[in-house]
Image (cartoon, rainbow, N blue to C red):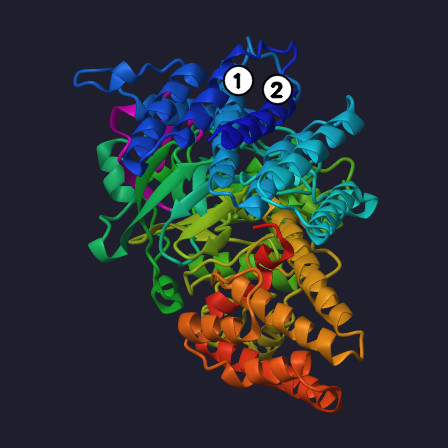
Amino acid sequence: MLKTALLSGLASLVIAVDWLRFEEPRSGGGRSIVLAVLAITPLLLRPLWVRLAAFAVSALLAAWVAFSISPLALRPGGEGFFGPLGSRFSRGFLDFYDYRLPFDPAEHPRMHGVILIAIFGFTFAVALAVAARRALFAVVLFFIAAGWPATLLAGGNELGRGVAILAVTLALLAGMTERPTRLALIAAGAVLVGALALSSSPAVAKSAFLDWQHWDFYTRPQKAVSVRYLWDAHYDGVSFPKKGTTVLTIRAPQRSHYWRATVLDRFDGTRWLEDVWPESARERRELQPAPKRSRLFRQEVTVVALRDDHVIGASLPVTNDLGRAAAYEGQGVARVIGGLHRDQHYAVWSYSPRPTPEQLARVPPSYPRALTRPGRELDLAPGVTVPSFATAGRDARLSRLLTGRLLPYATLYERTRRVAGETRSPYAAAVALETWLRSTGGFTYSEHPGTTPGLPPLVGFVVGTKSGYCQHFAGAMAVMLRLLGIPSRVAAGFLPGRYHADFWQVTDRDAHTWVEVWFHGFGWLPFDPTPGRGHLIGTYSSTSRGFNAAVAAKLLAGLVKGGEVFGSDARSATNLRDRLRRNPRSGDLPLGIGSRVSAGQKKRTHSLLVFLFLLAAGVAAVIVLLKTARRKIRYLTRDPRRIAVACARELAEFVHDQRVPTLEAATFRELGGAVSDQLGVDARSFAQAATSARYGPPESARQAARSARKELHELKRRLRRSLTKSDRARGLLSVRSLGLG
């Protein structure tokens, strides 16, 4: 008991000093001493039920000391204990990714509480291994407890800390070994030298095995844990971070839906802006058909690192469970009062119509007044509303509107007409523009595109540079559709992300914009003209994996005259199919649906788990090599008597590693009897051969020694077959035969 207290106390001292280095100014050590005592005391008590009860009390008191949460909160009618404890610990833990080290404990009490809990938890783990006299486990746990914080904050007396860690490690090994042999000391030294070399190797440090930024189990962004977006369009370039930050996790079906935050429904003549207008109940019924239950699906959204006030949901969101915490603005857009916060959970129900190309091809160009009146989805600039699709005399009316600062859009309109051709099908025009921008028009994706001086950004993009990112592609398609008189707007949010078992992981690099087009009887449907950035699930879109280019070309050929994508020429179907098959991927981002990351692009990331695995593998290799080397050295003799003794020692160590008790000075017959009794394998042949080699006449001793080694080999083979795989692995890695257990 005294040995447990002394060794555990010595280890806790080094652990506390290393963890308290994170604080500046340093807080007093009084609390850490109290927590160390609370961690060690339960392990000094007997029997087991008393120890368990004492640990429960110690854990409650540790939470009280660290986070000032009184155990009295557990009583009926109290304020609650575990809820506040979990909240303060999680907040404090995540604060380590927001603030630099060292930190002021007075300004960040939750972080200080996490430090104290770490001291308590690691001290208890080491003390538990010490009390069980498991030297190897105690050393490994102490190495993690004291070595991990040493890698989080460099500087200071690093040599002194290393010496202290080494000294305590040797004390643990010596203190838990009754009679440490010379080989045991050699083994301990080899393990320590290997571990220290691994910890201090420049190659290892360069690979970031000990870089705390790679050890966290929370995805740490480059600068801050919160990501904020300004959804209004801009066209002067975009920079995605090299390391993605998870902003949302969403439990939803595996179908890859786009996650919509808002819509940019106002075009000011230059760029798209968020200006959601609230629709009346009547307008809502006109614009969005009553969703069928079979097309409604639920998503559970968890906010990880997104600073925003929009309710994110699959396109097209219908309702949510936030109640009064969210305010509905219109057009399926809702805002959270006070904004989203980390770890917030909510559910969204979305409507996902999936019409076929045949159904949309039959939709007439009929639009409600809610979409065509000034200030709605046909505005090209403030006070400029274009006539709706396929109305009489619209070209003449439009030419009178495209004057002055809107004159460049006359060029864009002419380009739009050549692409879409003459058609009375809004769907034919929409899918033609989507296909042209994404696949067949010669456009490329670029995060830093060039500009065309003297032209509005989107006009210059289409008729000039043909290079841009999602805001260029989506913005241009929406403007071109409005020029044709088809109600359209830009939607903003995120690509589906990456699917893991039962949830989608959405990162900041999945931020995206696309187009929504209104169709009578179906409402707003998404289209995505950006090359290589995503795939919609609706087979009506050329971005869908289920889109059949040949069938679509044949279907629309009779509806389009003279278009660059679809037309009555039968060869256009073949050309379209071939061009879609050669869909360029030059614009793919390193992350995103359908994109690939080459071997040279993949960044190697390491974690604490990788480091621990390498450390464990290194220690295991040292143990196996030491055992093998010792066994081989013993047989470097021709003396049959020494060979017999070496065989007996090899067998004794084998059974000792299987935790079979044997006498220290047992005879060959006694050793064979112990093997037969404890492990159920007959060892009499080995015992007879070893006895003859050790005590027989010289003329027969050499042959007996060879027989003893042969019998030992056969005996160990039968012993291994009688053991389970876990027992064999435990024996292989056991340090009992090395004098360390």
In the rendered structure, which disc, 2 or 1, sits on the residue that comes first in sequence?
2
Q: Outermost residue, left direction? A: 76
* Marks 2 & 1, CB-CB < 8 Å contact: yes
Packing grade of label 2 (10 A; few <14, some 14-19, many >=20) is many
Which amino acid type corresponds to the residue marked 1 in the rendered image?
A: Ser
Disc 1 crowd rating (10 Å Cα; few below 14, some 14-19, many 20+) is: many
Q: Name the residue located 76 percent from the left edge and 35 percent from the top edge.
A: 454
Up the image or down, 675 lies above or below 62; here it is below
Residue marked by disc 2: 20
At horizontal 44% and vertical 76% (from top left) the residue drawn is: 676
First to last magenta residue range:
316-342
The answer for how far apart the CA atoms under marks 2 and 1 are is: 9 Å
**Label tally:** 2
637 relative position to 682: left or right: right
Residue at x-position 22% and y-position 48%:
290
User: Quadrant location of residue 594?
Assistant: bottom right
Secondary structure category for the residue under label 1: helix
Residue 575, compared with residue 362, is above or below; it is: below
